[in-house]
Image (cartoon, rainbow, N blue to C red):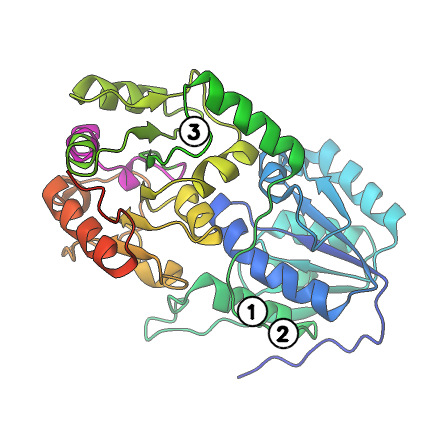
Amino acid sequence: MQNPAIKLNAPKNILIRGPNPIGDLIMATASFADIRKRFPEARITMLVRGAQARVLVGSDFFDELMIDDSARGFVEMFRLARRLWQQRFDFCVLYTNSLRTAFIVALAGIPERAGFAKGGQSLFLTQVVKPILNEQKKWLPTPMPEIYGRLSRVIGANPENGWPQLTVTDACESRAQALKKSLGIGEHEKLIGLAPGAAFGQSKLWPPGHFAALADKLTEKYGLPTIILSGPGEEANTRAMVTAMKTKPLVTDKPIDLDLLKPFIRDLALLVATDSGPRHFATAFRVPTVVVMGPTDPRWSGANLDRQEVVRHDVPCGPCHKKICPLDHRCMIGITPDEVMGRIAQLDDRLGIFGSSAV
């Protein structure tokens, strides 16, 4: 059943609170763009956590980026509420499922507040997007761009193709080129990217030895160097991977900032990633990608797969969505490097990624 749209004639000041997970934030950018198109004259402020702001810098679907530090405690909650109250927003759209965030925007006196019926936040919303439930009365797994489209439709926007949108600023481009030069990467050199991490938790990780064996096979077959793209806290996993490799990958001295990750992934010939943020960066830039997926239901991210292959095994215990596997991690360990190589070959046949570069 479709939720009715909020009746607003010409809102002048809109607040959008973006989702917290990086992948979800990127998938939501299409919906943000739909709102901008619906209200081109309005002032739109994006409210996100500090690290996430780097992902959105340069985008044209907002006028201001505001940082949400309210998770630090009650003092920051009330400071944020006061800042929002001073902005005099007409309405806000919450892409989070957070009781705290909904309370803050209500406290800020924003008259219209739209969000999902999840996380206990309905009490503080004026317009609730109800979920589509499965037989167990739980949210029916649905591609997130479709879910976000239902939210933007409630406020009068017209969802379009649901394709994520990211932008690289000139300043970011310059920093990326400088970093590439320091790594010895040529200006137009093509690389194969490996993104072995996952902020979600251990359950999404493919064994470092598997990633290492795959990297060696890729360089041997296609003659292209590999680069490991890792995030904060993933250093041990990266070291284990490098130690197990016979070929020598490119590795940065420290994790690549999220804004720099955009041009690095944009310029890849191919990305192999877990079900994590980097795969969604690749989607936005149409980079061919193979995703090694384990504990998560593929239907949540089952959109915009034209240039992707998802490798996963159906196992009796999955998809469990647990951060740490309580059993033997069979959903990920059972996926072999040869199996992934086969899917890369299929993607190459379909998209012509490597041309005649196989050796």
| Residue in front for this viewpoint, 206 or 4 | 206
- Residue type, numbered disc 1: Gly
Quadrant in the rendering for residue 300: bottom left
Type of amino acid under label 3? Gly
Percent x, y of residue 96: 58, 53
Q: Residue at x 82, y 63 (%)?
A: 111
Q: Which residues are magenta?
A: 199-215
N-term mark: 3 or 1: 1
Q: Residues within 10 Å of mark 3 (few under 14, many from 20)?
A: many
Which of the two labelled residues, at mark 2 and mark 3, occupies the earlier sequence position? 2
Q: Residue at x 42, y 47 (%)?
A: 282
Is there CB contact under 8 Å for labels 2 and 1? yes
Residue 124 against residue 107 in the figure, above or below: below
Residue 180 among those drawn in magenta: no
Say whether residue 51 is left or right of residue 230: right
Question: To which residue does mark 2 refer?
Answer: 153
Q: Report how far apart the C-alphas of labels 3 and 1 lie in the structure.
A: 29 Å
Let me know if residue 59 appears in the view: yes
Q: Which element carries disc 2, helix, strand or loop? A: helix
Query: Please, what is the three-letter code of the amino acid marked with disc 2?
Result: Arg
- The numbered dot on residue 231 is 3
Q: Which residue lies under the disc numbered 1?
A: 149
Main SS class of the magenta portion in the image? helix
Please give the name of the residue rendered at 28% of the width and 23% of the height, measured from the top-left corner.
249
How far, Cα to Cα, is label 2 from label 3?
Answer: 34 Å
Q: Counting other residues with Cα less than 10 Å from the Cα at mark 2, is it few (<14), some (14-19), or many (20 or more)?
A: many
Rendered position, 128 above or below 33:
below
